[in-house]
Amino acid sequence: MDIIGLGYMGFEATDLDAWRDYGPAVMGFAIGQNPEGDPDSLYFRMDDRRHRLAFHPGKVDRLAYLGWEAKGRMEFKAACRKFTDAGVDFTVGDAELCEKRGVKELIRFFDPVGFRHELFYGQKWLPDSFVPGRRHGGYLAGRRGLGHVVLMTPEFPPELEDFLINIMGFHWYGSGAGKGKTGFFRSRLNTFTSHDIAYGHAPGRMGIQHVGLFVGSLRDVGETYDIVKKRELQMMMTLGQHSQDPHISFYHFNPSGFAFECIAESEPWHDDGFELNPEKMSVWGHELVGPILGPSVKTPEEVGDPEFKAKKG
Ligand SMILES: [Fe+2]
Protein backbone atom coordinates (compact mmCIF):
# COMPACT_ATOMS: atom_id res chain seq x y z
CA MET A 1 0.00 0.00 0.00
CA ASP A 2 1.50 3.31 -1.07
CA ILE A 3 1.07 5.21 2.19
CA ILE A 4 3.11 8.35 2.95
CA GLY A 5 2.52 8.39 6.69
CA LEU A 6 0.08 9.79 9.24
CA GLY A 7 -1.77 12.64 7.56
CA TYR A 8 -4.03 13.52 10.48
CA MET A 9 -5.11 12.24 13.86
CA GLY A 10 -8.42 12.64 15.69
CA PHE A 11 -9.08 12.49 19.42
CA GLU A 12 -11.99 12.75 21.80
CA ALA A 13 -11.14 15.14 24.61
CA THR A 14 -12.79 16.18 27.87
CA ASP A 15 -11.30 19.67 28.14
CA LEU A 16 -11.21 21.50 24.82
CA ASP A 17 -10.66 24.86 26.57
CA ALA A 18 -7.39 23.56 28.01
CA TRP A 19 -6.34 22.45 24.52
CA ARG A 20 -7.38 25.81 23.04
CA ASP A 21 -4.88 27.52 25.35
CA TYR A 22 -2.17 24.85 25.40
CA GLY A 23 -2.03 24.11 21.65
CA PRO A 24 -0.92 27.54 20.42
CA ALA A 25 0.88 28.72 23.60
CA VAL A 26 2.95 25.59 24.32
CA MET A 27 3.19 23.71 21.02
CA GLY A 28 2.89 26.63 18.61
CA PHE A 29 -0.05 25.02 16.80
CA ALA A 30 -2.39 27.30 14.86
CA ILE A 31 -6.12 27.01 15.46
CA GLY A 32 -7.77 25.94 12.22
CA GLN A 33 -11.18 26.84 10.91
CA ASN A 34 -13.99 24.51 11.87
CA PRO A 35 -15.57 22.76 8.92
CA GLU A 36 -19.23 23.41 8.26
CA GLY A 37 -21.40 21.23 10.46
CA ASP A 38 -18.75 20.75 13.15
CA PRO A 39 -18.71 23.91 15.29
CA ASP A 40 -17.76 22.15 18.56
CA SER A 41 -14.48 20.47 17.65
CA LEU A 42 -11.03 22.04 17.82
CA TYR A 43 -8.75 21.77 14.82
CA PHE A 44 -5.01 22.42 14.97
CA ARG A 45 -2.75 23.21 12.05
CA MET A 46 0.95 22.29 12.08
CA ASP A 47 1.78 23.24 8.52
CA ASP A 48 0.02 24.30 5.34
CA ARG A 49 -2.56 21.51 5.50
CA ARG A 50 -6.09 22.46 6.58
CA HIS A 51 -5.49 20.62 9.84
CA ARG A 52 -3.37 17.84 11.30
CA LEU A 53 -4.89 17.24 14.74
CA ALA A 54 -8.61 17.27 15.54
CA PHE A 55 -10.09 17.26 19.03
CA HIS A 56 -13.75 16.35 19.33
CA PRO A 57 -15.75 16.80 22.57
CA GLY A 58 -15.97 13.50 24.43
CA LYS A 59 -16.66 11.92 27.82
CA VAL A 60 -13.18 10.43 28.03
CA ASP A 61 -9.80 11.33 26.55
CA ARG A 62 -9.12 8.81 23.83
CA LEU A 63 -7.73 8.32 20.36
CA ALA A 64 -10.65 8.42 17.93
CA TYR A 65 -8.92 7.71 14.60
CA LEU A 66 -5.59 7.70 12.78
CA GLY A 67 -5.65 9.13 9.26
CA TRP A 68 -3.18 7.46 6.90
CA GLU A 69 -2.36 9.32 3.72
CA ALA A 70 -2.31 7.46 0.41
CA LYS A 71 -0.09 9.16 -2.12
CA GLY A 72 -3.00 9.93 -4.45
CA ARG A 73 -6.20 8.68 -6.04
CA MET A 74 -4.69 5.72 -7.88
CA GLU A 75 -2.87 4.51 -4.76
CA PHE A 76 -6.09 4.96 -2.74
CA LYS A 77 -8.09 2.89 -5.24
CA ALA A 78 -5.41 0.18 -5.22
CA ALA A 79 -5.56 0.12 -1.41
CA CYS A 80 -9.35 -0.29 -1.47
CA ARG A 81 -8.97 -3.22 -3.87
CA LYS A 82 -6.38 -4.76 -1.54
CA PHE A 83 -8.77 -4.49 1.43
CA THR A 84 -11.58 -6.04 -0.61
CA ASP A 85 -9.39 -8.91 -1.86
CA ALA A 86 -8.10 -9.57 1.66
CA GLY A 87 -11.59 -9.51 3.15
CA VAL A 88 -10.88 -6.53 5.41
CA ASP A 89 -14.07 -4.78 6.46
CA PHE A 90 -14.16 -1.09 5.59
CA THR A 91 -16.72 1.64 5.17
CA VAL A 92 -16.57 4.48 2.68
CA GLY A 93 -16.66 7.99 4.14
CA ASP A 94 -19.55 10.08 2.79
CA ALA A 95 -19.28 13.62 1.44
CA GLU A 96 -19.98 15.13 4.87
CA LEU A 97 -17.14 13.19 6.52
CA CYS A 98 -14.75 13.99 3.66
CA GLU A 99 -15.59 17.68 4.12
CA LYS A 100 -14.89 17.42 7.87
CA ARG A 101 -11.51 15.82 7.22
CA GLY A 102 -10.84 18.15 4.28
CA VAL A 103 -9.99 15.25 1.97
CA LYS A 104 -11.01 13.97 -1.48
CA GLU A 105 -12.02 10.47 -0.37
CA LEU A 106 -11.56 8.24 2.66
CA ILE A 107 -12.31 4.80 4.01
CA ARG A 108 -12.56 3.70 7.64
CA PHE A 109 -11.55 0.39 9.21
CA PHE A 110 -10.27 -1.19 12.42
CA ASP A 111 -6.98 -2.91 13.07
CA PRO A 112 -7.23 -6.37 14.70
CA VAL A 113 -6.89 -4.92 18.23
CA GLY A 114 -9.63 -2.29 17.89
CA PHE A 115 -7.98 1.02 16.98
CA ARG A 116 -9.84 2.90 14.27
CA HIS A 117 -7.92 3.91 11.17
CA GLU A 118 -8.79 5.92 8.09
CA LEU A 119 -7.09 6.00 4.71
CA PHE A 120 -7.43 9.11 2.56
CA TYR A 121 -5.80 11.14 -0.15
CA GLY A 122 -5.82 14.79 -1.19
CA GLN A 123 -6.17 16.80 2.03
CA LYS A 124 -6.89 20.52 1.55
CA TRP A 125 -3.77 22.64 1.60
CA LEU A 126 -2.64 26.19 0.89
CA PRO A 127 1.03 27.11 0.46
CA ASP A 128 2.62 29.50 2.98
CA SER A 129 -0.60 29.72 4.98
CA PHE A 130 0.62 28.36 8.33
CA VAL A 131 1.06 31.02 11.01
CA PRO A 132 2.15 29.43 14.31
CA GLY A 133 0.39 30.21 17.58
CA ARG A 134 3.66 31.57 18.99
CA ARG A 135 7.16 32.09 17.62
CA HIS A 136 7.98 28.71 16.16
CA GLY A 137 10.08 27.50 13.24
CA GLY A 138 7.39 25.06 12.11
CA TYR A 139 6.81 21.33 11.97
CA LEU A 140 8.18 18.79 9.50
CA ALA A 141 5.00 17.11 8.33
CA GLY A 142 4.87 17.01 4.55
CA ARG A 143 6.35 14.02 2.78
CA ARG A 144 6.89 12.10 6.00
CA GLY A 145 3.49 12.59 7.60
CA LEU A 146 2.85 14.49 10.81
CA GLY A 147 5.00 12.29 13.07
CA HIS A 148 4.60 8.99 14.88
CA VAL A 149 2.30 7.44 17.42
CA VAL A 150 2.94 4.76 20.04
CA LEU A 151 -0.16 2.83 21.07
CA MET A 152 -0.64 0.50 24.01
CA THR A 153 -2.65 -2.54 23.06
CA PRO A 154 -4.28 -5.00 25.49
CA GLU A 155 -3.57 -7.85 23.05
CA PHE A 156 -0.71 -8.39 20.61
CA PRO A 157 -1.91 -11.28 18.41
CA PRO A 158 -0.07 -12.47 15.26
CA GLU A 159 -2.99 -11.02 13.25
CA LEU A 160 -1.85 -7.52 14.25
CA GLU A 161 1.59 -7.85 12.65
CA ASP A 162 0.07 -9.62 9.67
CA PHE A 163 -2.36 -6.74 9.21
CA LEU A 164 0.32 -4.04 9.51
CA ILE A 165 2.90 -5.75 7.31
CA ASN A 166 0.87 -7.69 4.75
CA ILE A 167 -2.24 -5.50 4.41
CA MET A 168 -1.01 -1.98 5.25
CA GLY A 169 2.34 -2.73 3.61
CA PHE A 170 4.39 -1.31 6.49
CA HIS A 171 8.09 -2.02 6.96
CA TRP A 172 9.04 -3.72 10.21
CA TYR A 173 11.58 -1.49 11.95
CA GLY A 174 12.29 -3.41 15.12
CA SER A 175 11.27 -3.93 18.71
CA GLY A 176 12.98 -0.90 20.19
CA ALA A 177 14.79 -0.97 23.48
CA GLY A 178 11.66 -0.99 25.64
CA LYS A 179 10.65 -3.85 27.90
CA GLY A 180 8.02 -6.37 26.88
CA LYS A 181 6.58 -6.96 23.44
CA THR A 182 6.69 -3.95 21.13
CA GLY A 183 6.78 -3.44 17.39
CA PHE A 184 7.78 -0.38 15.37
CA PHE A 185 6.52 0.04 11.81
CA ARG A 186 7.05 2.49 8.95
CA SER A 187 4.72 3.12 6.04
CA ARG A 188 5.94 1.99 2.63
CA LEU A 189 6.76 5.39 1.14
CA ASN A 190 8.31 6.84 4.29
CA THR A 191 12.06 7.05 3.77
CA PHE A 192 12.43 10.02 6.11
CA THR A 193 11.83 8.55 9.55
CA SER A 194 12.30 5.17 11.18
CA HIS A 195 8.72 4.58 12.33
CA ASP A 196 5.22 6.00 11.97
CA ILE A 197 3.51 3.72 14.45
CA ALA A 198 4.45 1.41 17.28
CA TYR A 199 2.35 -0.96 19.38
CA GLY A 200 3.34 -1.93 22.90
CA HIS A 201 1.69 -4.86 24.65
CA ALA A 202 0.00 -3.75 27.86
CA PRO A 203 -2.40 -6.47 29.08
CA GLY A 204 -5.65 -4.93 30.28
CA ARG A 205 -4.66 -1.44 29.10
CA MET A 206 -5.33 0.52 25.94
CA GLY A 207 -4.58 3.99 24.60
CA ILE A 208 -1.91 6.36 23.38
CA GLN A 209 1.48 6.31 25.07
CA HIS A 210 2.85 9.23 23.07
CA VAL A 211 2.76 11.11 19.79
CA GLY A 212 6.11 12.22 18.33
CA LEU A 213 6.17 15.49 16.38
CA PHE A 214 9.16 16.74 14.38
CA VAL A 215 10.20 20.38 14.52
CA GLY A 216 12.57 22.09 12.12
CA SER A 217 15.31 23.00 14.57
CA LEU A 218 16.74 22.22 17.99
CA ARG A 219 15.72 25.74 19.04
CA ASP A 220 12.06 24.73 18.76
CA VAL A 221 12.64 21.74 21.04
CA GLY A 222 14.50 23.95 23.52
CA GLU A 223 11.94 26.74 23.55
CA THR A 224 9.09 24.26 24.01
CA TYR A 225 11.10 22.67 26.86
CA ASP A 226 11.40 26.08 28.55
CA ILE A 227 7.66 26.76 28.20
CA VAL A 228 6.76 23.31 29.57
CA LYS A 229 9.03 23.89 32.59
CA LYS A 230 7.76 27.44 33.15
CA ARG A 231 4.16 26.21 33.11
CA GLU A 232 5.17 23.31 35.39
CA LEU A 233 3.53 20.77 33.09
CA GLN A 234 4.12 17.12 33.94
CA MET A 235 7.26 15.90 32.21
CA MET A 236 7.70 12.24 31.29
CA MET A 237 11.32 12.26 30.12
CA THR A 238 13.86 15.05 30.17
CA LEU A 239 15.82 16.18 27.14
CA GLY A 240 17.87 13.37 25.62
CA GLN A 241 19.07 11.63 22.49
CA HIS A 242 17.67 8.30 21.34
CA SER A 243 19.94 5.46 20.30
CA GLN A 244 17.70 3.85 17.66
CA ASP A 245 16.83 7.14 15.91
CA PRO A 246 18.87 10.32 15.38
CA HIS A 247 16.35 12.14 17.62
CA ILE A 248 16.95 14.76 20.28
CA SER A 249 13.70 15.09 22.17
CA PHE A 250 11.81 15.37 25.42
CA TYR A 251 8.41 14.07 26.51
CA HIS A 252 5.71 15.92 28.43
CA PHE A 253 2.01 15.37 29.05
CA ASN A 254 -0.65 17.36 27.20
CA PRO A 255 -4.17 18.18 28.46
CA SER A 256 -5.51 14.79 27.30
CA GLY A 257 -3.04 12.87 29.46
CA PHE A 258 -0.84 11.38 26.77
CA ALA A 259 2.66 12.61 26.00
CA PHE A 260 3.99 14.65 23.14
CA GLU A 261 7.57 13.91 22.15
CA CYS A 262 8.99 17.09 20.68
CA ILE A 263 11.76 16.01 18.30
CA ALA A 264 14.63 17.58 16.38
CA GLU A 265 16.76 15.30 14.22
CA SER A 266 20.49 15.41 14.95
CA GLU A 267 21.05 14.13 11.40
CA PRO A 268 18.72 12.94 8.62
CA TRP A 269 17.40 9.45 9.32
CA HIS A 270 18.85 6.71 7.15
CA ASP A 271 18.15 3.01 7.03
CA ASP A 272 21.01 1.22 8.80
CA GLY A 273 20.61 -1.81 6.57
CA PHE A 274 20.16 -4.21 9.47
CA GLU A 275 17.73 -4.57 12.35
CA LEU A 276 18.79 -2.47 15.32
CA ASN A 277 19.04 -3.99 18.78
CA PRO A 278 19.95 -1.06 21.04
CA GLU A 279 21.79 -1.67 24.33
CA LYS A 280 19.66 1.11 25.80
CA MET A 281 16.95 3.47 24.64
CA SER A 282 19.00 6.68 24.80
CA VAL A 283 22.67 7.61 24.64
CA TRP A 284 22.23 10.56 27.00
CA GLY A 285 19.40 12.22 28.90
CA HIS A 286 15.77 11.04 28.71
CA GLU A 287 15.65 10.65 32.47
CA LEU A 288 12.28 9.22 33.42
CA VAL A 289 10.74 11.83 35.73
CA GLY A 290 7.05 10.96 35.32
CA PRO A 291 4.81 8.01 34.55
CA ILE A 292 5.63 6.07 31.37
CA LEU A 293 1.89 5.56 30.77
CA GLY A 294 -0.24 8.64 31.28
CA PRO A 295 -3.84 8.83 32.46
CA SER A 296 -5.16 8.44 28.92
CA VAL A 297 -4.05 4.80 28.91
CA LYS A 298 -7.05 3.09 30.48
CA THR A 299 -8.96 -0.18 30.18
CA PRO A 300 -10.34 -1.23 26.78
CA GLU A 301 -13.81 -0.89 28.34
CA GLU A 302 -13.14 2.80 29.01
CA VAL A 303 -11.35 3.86 25.82
CA GLY A 304 -12.15 1.15 23.27
CA ASP A 305 -14.16 2.11 20.19
CA PRO A 306 -17.86 1.38 20.84
CA GLU A 307 -18.38 0.23 17.25
CA PHE A 308 -15.49 -2.26 17.47
CA LYS A 309 -16.80 -3.58 20.78
CA ALA A 310 -20.27 -4.05 19.25
CA LYS A 311 -18.77 -5.88 16.26
CA LYS A 312 -16.78 -8.22 18.48
CA GLY A 313 -19.89 -8.89 20.56
FE1 LIG B 1 8.71 8.66 19.94
Image (cartoon, rainbow, N blue to C red):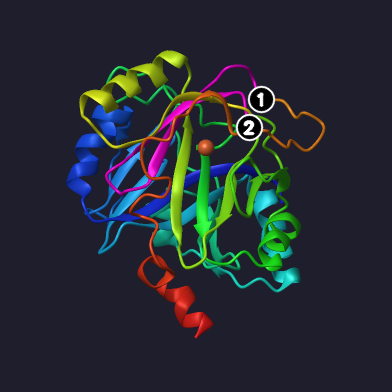
Q: In which quarter of the image is residue 79?
A: bottom right
Q: Tell me if 194 is positioned left or right of 117 in this view.
A: right
Judged left or right of residue 125, residue 168 is right
Magenta segment includes 252 = yes
Measured in 3D between alpha carbons, the distance from the residue under mark 1 to the one under mark 2, in whole angstroms, is: 6 Å
When asked about the image quadrant of residue 186, the answer is top right
Residue 52 in the image: state x and y as whole percent: 42, 41
Contact (CB < 8 A) between labels 1 and 2?
A: yes
Q: Is mark 1 on a helix, strand or loop?
A: loop
Q: Label 1 amino acid? A: Trp
| Residue type at the position of mark 2 | Thr
Q: What element carries label 2?
A: loop
Q: In this view, does 112 lie above or below 200?
A: below
Q: In this view, does 71 lie above or below 310?
A: above
Mark identifier at residue 269 = 1
Please identify the residue farthest to the left as the structure is shown: 17
Sequence-first disc among 1 and 2:
2
Q: Which residue is depicted at the point 26% across and 52% down?
A: 41
What residue range appears in magenta?
A: 245-268
- Classify 10 Å Cα crowding around label 2: few (below 14), some (14-19), many (20 and above): many
Look at the image and tell me whether residue 50 can be seen: no
